[in-house]
Image: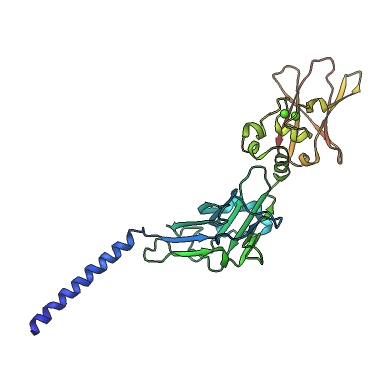
Amino acid sequence: MGTLNNASFPMTGIRLFVLFLVCLSGVSTGAFASQINWRSSIAATNLTSDGTTLMNGSFEFQLGSFTNGFLPTAENVSEWDGHWQALDTTAYNQTTRFFSSSVLLTTNASPFALGTSGYIWGRNKIQGADNEWILMRSVRWRWPVANNGVAFPVEWEVDESTIAILGEANGANFQMKSARVETGNSNAADDWLAAHFTAAQLADPSVSGWDADPDKDGSHNLLEFTTGGDPLKIDSEISATTWSQTNPATKGFTLKLPVTPAARDLVAVKMQFSTTLKVWLPLPAQETPGENSVSFSVTPGNASLYYRLAVAFK
Ligand SMILES: [Ca+2]
Ligand SMILES: [Ca+2]
């Protein structure tokens, strides 16, 4: 009997070893990675900056981090995109009023270094609309060990966000509230697009693109914006240009182009002249503070003179 018992111990040991292998194999079928489930609460009230308009389907949320130790603040929003690295992206569901996604963390390479902060960044994506952003983190949202096959999924949920860098999270009557953001100098131009085109037109570059001329009056939309024209109505802005003779002897004249205050900081207006249509020379622009126009003085003498106008975002 004693001999039989002794013989059975190695057998039990082998069986345990086999079971352990099977167990490891079972975990590995889920890929050796750490899964992050990230979401907002279903059917929550999520507002935009006016405090009443609900977030809609144009909002998109990303899970990610900022590179090179960049610390996002409300003051450096224009630099966020340049430092942002998204790990996962998901759309906001307007009907169920939440977002939810899962992603596998497969590397702890920068900016997903173990233990450093992860963020959830939501923003609307409508061309020409005001930018609405929310950027949140939580003291708990720290990157786990990548490729950790035995770890349970990590849950990052907006209802535990304690830190909103932009916008607000977990207020008294909402879960998320985005903030209006002005990034760089593009907003006056975006406002102009939004004021002149419908959502369907904004989605169509052949109508609302800066190079488009939907009313076929010879002024593309950027020139319409610059001079205060109506992009959907034939009203030749070039005809609004003022020509005034300054010196009859030299046939000198001044050309004055209207430039709206909104366009003044955003758009560079350049004029060139030529007598041959081959060689073009610049005309210096004269800008008078407080005057919504740019002037160019020309002294053609007896030569035939051609001119061309160029407008471009600065
Ligand atoms: Ca036009
Ligand atoms: Ca027009």
Please indicate whether residue 149 sits to the left or right of residue 177 in the image: left
Name the spot of residue 233 as percent of width and height, x first.
Answer: 75, 29
Residue that appears at 88% across and 19% down? 251
Image quarter hosting the N terminus? bottom left
Q: Is residue 227 above or below residue 46?
A: above
Q: Is residue 3 above or below residue 153?
A: below
304 horizontally vs 6: left or right: right
In the rendering, at what x and y percent does residue 20 appear? 26, 69
Q: Residue at x 72, y 37 (%)?
A: 196
Count of number-bearing discs: 0
Q: Colour scheme of this structure image?
A: rainbow
Up-down: is 174 above or below 283?
Answer: below
State left or right for residue 189 relative to residue 140.
Answer: right
Residue 159 picture location, percent across and down: 57, 66
Q: Quadrant of residue 6?
A: bottom left
292 relative to 105 in the view: left or right: right
Question: Compared with residue 113, is residue 180 higher up or lower down, i.e. above or below?
Answer: above
> Percent from the top left, x then y, of residue 260?
80, 38
- Ligand 2's quadrant is top right
Rendered-image quadrant of the C terminus: top right
Please report the residue visible at 9 percent of the width from the left and 80 percent of the height from the top: 4
